[in-house]
Amino acid sequence: MYFNDAEHNPPHIHAKYDGKEAEFNIATGEKMVGSISPTAEYLTKQWIEMHQSELLQIWETQEFIKIEPLK
């Protein structure tokens, strides 16, 4: 997530992998724009689903909290 005046709704995250980037909607887990590998996209969607409430909290408060990676 980036916090600046340029950020916009809906709440979303930026996923970067292998030199590529995509944005994912936090509420739905769907890719909004960009392109990353199918495996990275799948794992990103799983991670969003597991941490949706924390991600929305970060979006609303603009205060980062540590979120564990997939294991």
Image: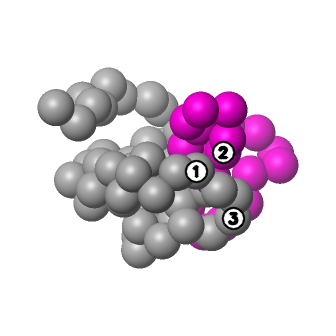
Q: Please tell me whether residue 2 belongs to the stretch shown in magenta.
A: yes
Please indicate whether residue 35 sits to the left or right of residue 17 in the image.
right
Q: Secondary structure at mark 1?
A: loop
Up-down relation of residue 26 to residue 30 (above or below): above
Report the residue marked by disc 1. Answer: 36
Foreground disc of the pair 3, 1: 1
- Percent position (x, y) of residue 25? 51, 65
Which colour assignment does the render follow?
one colour
Report the residue marked by disc 2. Answer: 21
- Percent position (x, y) of residue 47? 30, 49
What residue is shown at x 21% (from left), y 53% (from top)?
A: 50
Q: Which mark is residue 7?
A: none
Camera sees residue 62: yes
Q: Which mark is residue 33?
A: 3
Task: Check disc 1 and give the amino acid type.
Answer: Ile
Displayed quadrant of residue 3: top right
Please tell me how crowded label 2 is: few (under 14), some (14-19), or many (20+) other residues with Cα within 10 Å: some
Answer yes or no: do the residues labelled 3 and 1 have beta carbons within 8 Å?
no
| Numbered range of the magenta stretch | 1-22
Up-down relation of residue 5 to residue 27 (above or below): above
